[in-house]
Image (spheres, grey):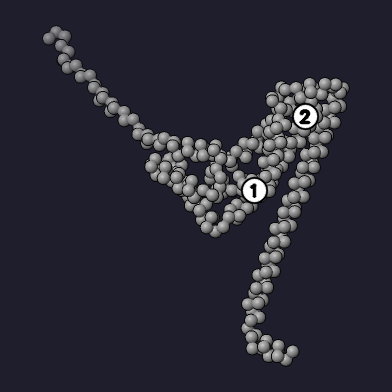
Amino acid sequence: MQEFLQWAGSYWWLIFPVMGMAGGAAKAWEQGAKRRHERRLETLKMKAQLKTAEIEARALNQQMKRRGPSVVDTTASVVPDDLLVRLFAEHDEITARWLDYELDVAKLIAFPAMSDGRQPLTAAFLRAKKTADALRPASAEAKVSEHQVAEYLQAVGDYAVAFEIAEKDARRLRDSTFTEPERKRLDRAQQLLKVAVDESATQAERNVAYKRVREELDGLILLSDDAVTVLEQQVAREISAPVTPAVEPAPEPVRMPLAEPQHPTPREGA
C-alpha cells in the first residue's frame, strides 16, 4: 500500500487526463442513452398513431354497415358519399410531398435519408406506400366492398403516418450519417448545383457544373431516373435573352398652320 501511495504521489498529475477521459466517456454514454430514448419515443408514437388509424378504420366500417342492409355480393357494394374521392386526395397529397424530395436534387442533398431505403423509418414509409398503392381502387366510381374501403382507408392512414415520421427523422439526421469527407462532397455538390440551374450562367458553365454534381454525388446519393431527367431539363433550359425595350419612333413635330395675312379693312367712303 505504501508503494502505491509513493507511486501515486510521483504521478499525481495523471489524475487530470484520467478525469477528462472519464468525463468524456460519461458524456458520450449520456448522449447515446438520450438518442435511444428519443428513438423509443418515436417508435411508441408511431405505434399509437397507427393504432388510432386502425380504430378509425373500424369505426368507419361499422358506420358504413349501419347505413344500409348488408350486401350479399361484397364485391359490388357502392361506397357512399365522396369517401374515395377524399381518400384519393389524401393519398395523392402524400405522394406529391414525397416526390418533392425524390425529384428535387437540392432537397435530396440536404435530406439524403428520404431516398435511403437502408434507413429503417424510410424503409417503413416505402413499404406503406407500396401497400397503399396496391389497395387503391381503380377510380372513385369503382364498385368496391366495405372491407376493401376499410383496408384502403387504413393503408392511407399508415402511409400518412409513415411519411410524417420518415420526414421528421430525415430532417433530424440531415448528413450526420456521412463521414466528414463525404459531407464536404455534399457541400460541394450543393454549391455546384446552384450554378448548374442558374439561368444567368452560360450553357457551358451549367454543363460543367452538372457533370461535377454527378461526380460528387456518385456513391453517396442514388438519384432516380426521374430526378436525373428533371435536373437535366433544368440545366438545358434555354437561357432567356435580355428583353430590350422597343424604341418608339420620335413623334413628328406638330406643324401649326400659318396665319393668313391680315388686310386692313377699307373705310367706308374711302
For the C terminus, give its image quadrant.
top left
Which quarter of the picture shows residue 138?
top right
Q: Nearer the viewer, mark 1 or mark 2?
A: 1
The answer, for residue 164, to whether it is visible in the render is no
Q: Residue furthest front?
A: 219
- Crowd rating for badge 2 (residues with CA inside 10 Å; few <14, some 14–19, many 20+): some
Residue drawn at (65%, 77%) of the image: 18
From the top left corner, tell me how far across and down residue 35 is, in percent: 70, 58
Q: Which residue is at 72% across, 61% downward?
A: 33
Q: Which mark is residue 118?
A: 1
Question: Which circle's residue, 1 or 2, is located before the other in the chain?
Answer: 1
Q: What kind of element bears circle 1?
A: loop
Nearer to the camera, 199 or 19: 19
Give the quadrant of the N terminus.
bottom right
Q: Nearer the viewer, residue 145 or 92?
A: 145
SS at circle 2: helix
Name which quarter of the figure residue 224 lies in: top right
Name the side, left or right, on which 268 lies relative to 108.
left
Q: Taking 38 as reference, is 101 above or below it?
A: above
Q: CA distance from mark 1 to mark 2?
A: 31 Å
Identity of the amino acid at label 2? Gln
Q: Residues within 10 Å of mark 1 (few under 14, many from 20)?
A: few
Establish if 5 lies above or below 81.
below
Please state the horizontal and vertical placement of residue 223, each as a whole percent of the image.
Answer: 55, 43
- What is the x, y in percent for residue 53? 78, 39
Q: Which mark is residue 28?
A: none
What residue is disc 2 on?
A: 148
Q: Position of residue 264 (x, y in %)?
A: 16, 15
